[in-house]
Image (cartoon, rainbow, N blue to C red):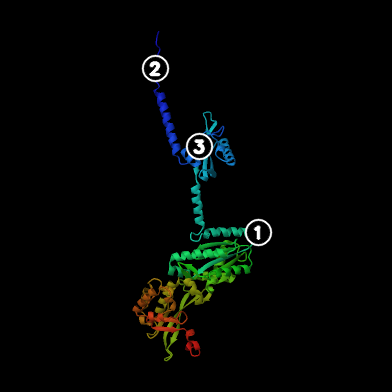
Amino acid sequence: ECILSAIIDVTERERASIELKSTRIFLNAIVESIPSMVFVKDVEDGRFVLINKAGENLLGLDRSEIIGKTDFDFFCEQDAQRFIAADQAVVAGEELVVIENEPVQTAKGVRSLRTQKVGVPDADGKQRYLLGVSEDVTERLAMEERNLHLSRHDILTELPNRLAFQDLLTRELEAAGNNGSSFALHLIDLDRFKAVNDSLGHHAGDELLRQVAARLLEVKQPDDIVARLGGDEFAIVQRGSPESMHVECLAKTVGSAFANAFVIDGQGVNVGCSIGISLYSKDGVTADALLKRADLALYTAKEAHCGGYSFFASLMEEKADRERLLREELRVALDNSQLRVVYQPIVDALTQRTVCCEALLRWNHPTLGSISPTEFIPAAEAAGLIPAIGRWVLYQACQQASHWPSTVKVAVNLSPLQFTGFNLAKDVAAALEMSGLTPDRLELEITESVFLRDSEDNIAILRQLKTLGVRIALDDFGTGYSSLSYLRSFAFDKIKIDRSFVTGLPSSVDSLS
């Protein structure tokens, strides 16, 4: 009898088994920790062979209820057929397939999934399994949709904003071009909105804008488009090939919508609106042309009177082009010596002697000829050139007056725009120093409009000028508000009363009273 024994070293096998077990635990931990649903299906019968914790949570089922089952056990037949068809396409194509924003009915309701699927081959290279990773993107899509809405809608009024309005207007133009229809563009600008912001605060201004939007939505037709373009400017696209009378009717209706006061914080607030109107295709066939011409009409309406409306007319564009040309030309007029100062003598009625000369600005353009101050002064104001031009006139007048007899003064008109900042007194002092003119021979003329804005600051500037020793005159008294409070706020050396203020005084019953 003998005993046969064999000793086999299984150390490596045990180590490999342990390593394999560790690898499985490691991979399982990774799969379980992935926040997206991970699943594996058998290619032969479509049955689930693996699903992770995130998949259980998404489907609302335990994995024991999922493993060994097919899509038909969890989803409606239509969805299951769709999933199976997609799986077959993935296996046949042998490459990664991404399915974006796929709607899936889950225990949490319909969710949007972003699913990546790829076939997994066996040792022979034959497709054996299908691996899928499904990310729930429902919240992300909702956030993207919300962000898109915010990017295209005004946060205060929920109306389409300028960006969205441009797209809507472009689409309306395409539709009108295809079917031969027409439409009207109304640009609406609030009157006295700044006063509401200044007096009641920006929160009141915001609430006013919300209420304005609500009223515009009430008066529009169902097919019309209302948008807020920014600030206190709104727009309406009146659709349906409206006739001129219908366009005018809407403009009047919008104006009437502002007749009743807006109630803000229990307080009635009255604002009006001005409206500029352009018509497709009469006034343009592009968005830029229609917007530009409606804006010109709006400017005309605001110039005429608050609370009105105006249709675009070609003369408006000609005027705007002329004003733009003047603004551009004025920028080089100073350097090219096109501007000059002329002097109107002021004669003492008793002695018949010239006691003062008023400096008047003139512009002789080389190609446009002589341009009236009533035309180029507004252009200079719009171009922001008044401070520079005013400074130049001041220097020229002082320099010229320094060569006159010492008994003759020079008067220079100041624009309210020259009171911006506190450089005016420095400019006057510099002009006097450079010319050698004594301060008492310089008379600065202002109008009542200086007191209508930043009056306290402007009075401080007037006192600085007075300290220099120059004379201050109030010009055109009687053409504006003609408030006696202006005369109390500052000690003027001279008050020039406008002719219109005194004409008819002896014969007018109202004046005599």
Cα gap from disc 2 to disc 1, whole angstroms: 95 Å
**Residue 116's x, y, as percent?**
52, 40
**Residue 122's x, y, as percent?**
52, 30
**Residue 185's x, y, as percent?**
58, 65
- Residue nearest the viewer, comparing 26 with 466: 26
- The N terminus, quarter of image: top left
In the drawing, what numbered circle is on residue 232?
A: none
Residue beneath label 3, please?
A: 39
Q: In the structure shown, which secondary structural element does the residue marked by tag 3 occupy?
A: strand
**Circle 2 crowding by C-alpha within 10 Å: few under 14, some 14–19, many from 20:** few
**Residue 88's x, y, as percent?**
58, 36
Which residue is situated farthest in the right direction here? 180
Residue 456 location, quadrant: bottom left
Q: In the structure shown, which secondary structural element does the residue marked by tag 1 occupy?
A: helix
Residue 351 location, quadrant: bottom left
Residue beneath label 1, please?
A: 179
CB-based contact (under 8 Å), mark 3 and mark 1? no
Q: N-terminal of the two: label 2 or label 1?
A: 2
Q: N-terminal of the two: label 2 or label 3?
A: 2
Which residue is situated farthest in the left direction here? 467
Tell me the mark number nearer the camera, choosing from 3 and 1: 3
Cα gap from disc 2 to disc 3, whole angstroms: 44 Å
> Is residue 91 among the parts visible in the rendering?
yes
Residue beneath label 2, please?
A: 7
- Relative to residue 175, is residue 491 drawn left or right? left
Under mark 3, the amino acid is Phe
Under mark 2, the amino acid is Ile
Cα gap from disc 3 to disc 1, whole angstroms: 53 Å
